[in-house]
Structures are given as C-alpha cells and as structure tokens.
C-alpha cells in the first residue's frame, strides 16, 4: 500500500491524530490511536507519509528546497537531542 489511496490517507490521518492528541495532553487518546494501526508497517507508512506531506507543505510555504529543509531539520534535531527534557 503506497501512494495516495484512501487506505494511505487513513494512515496519515491517524498519524496526525496521534500527534494532535499528544500536543493537547491527551496521552490516552494518542496511545489508543497508535494501537489502532494494524501493523508496525502501517504505522511506519502513516508517519512517513505525514512527514513527507508536512515537509512538502513547508517547502511550498517557505520556498526552500527540500534538501535545505531536511538539513535544517537535521541540525535542529541534533541541537535538541543534546538538551535535557523540560
């Protein structure tokens, strides 16, 4: 299951729901949505497609190349990985 199919769209929506639930403090809801994925492969695909869509939207809005965005994201991850959680 790849590409833009109704099943893939459902996986993306579920992945986005996990993130939204976590950010509003609904950890039980996020866990419930995570458990609703049929398999680890489906979960991975959903989050991959969500990341791809998010980067595409950011690229369109910012005018930056995808390579530049990924480079910035990698640097941000490296910097924040060294910080203690608050």
Image: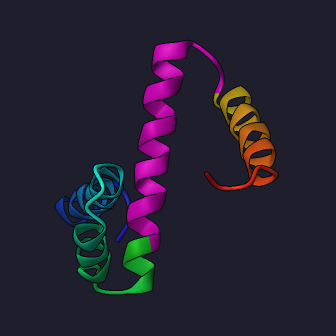
How many marks the image carries: the answer is: 0
Residue 2 or 80: which is nearer the viewer? 80
* Residue 70 among magenta residues: no
Horizontally, residue 27 falls left or right of residue 61, namely left
Residue 27 image position (x, y, % from top left): 31, 67
Horizontally, residue 58 falls left or right of residue 70, namely left
Horizontally, residue 15 falls left or right of residue 71, namely left
Write the residue at 54% across / 14% down: 62
Residue farthest along the left direction in this orientation: 6
Relative to residue 72, is residue 82 depicted above or below? below
Residue 59 image position (x, y, % from top left): 53, 24
| Quarter of the image with the N terminus in it | bottom left
Residue 60 image position (x, y, % from top left): 47, 19
Relative to residue 53, is residue 57 depicted above or below? above
Residue farthest along the front direction in this orientation: 86
Q: Quadrant of residue 21?
A: bottom left
Write down the region rendered in magenta: 44-65
Write the residue at 32% across / 75% down: 34
Q: Quadrant of residue 85?
A: bottom right
Residue 86 image position (x, y, % from top left): 61, 51
Relative to residue 78, is residue 8 depicted above or below? below
């Amino acid at each position: 299951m790849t590409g833009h199919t109704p099943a893939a769209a459902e996986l993306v929506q579920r992945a986005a729901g996990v993130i939204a639930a976590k950010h509003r403090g609904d950890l039980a809801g996020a866990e419930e949505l995570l458990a609703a994925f049929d398999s680890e492969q489906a979960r991975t695909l959903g989050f991959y497609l969500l990341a791809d869509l998010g980067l595409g939207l950011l690229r369109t809005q910012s005018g930056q190349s995808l390579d530049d965005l990924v480079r910035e994201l990698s640097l941000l991850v490296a910097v924040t990985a060294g910080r203690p959680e608050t």
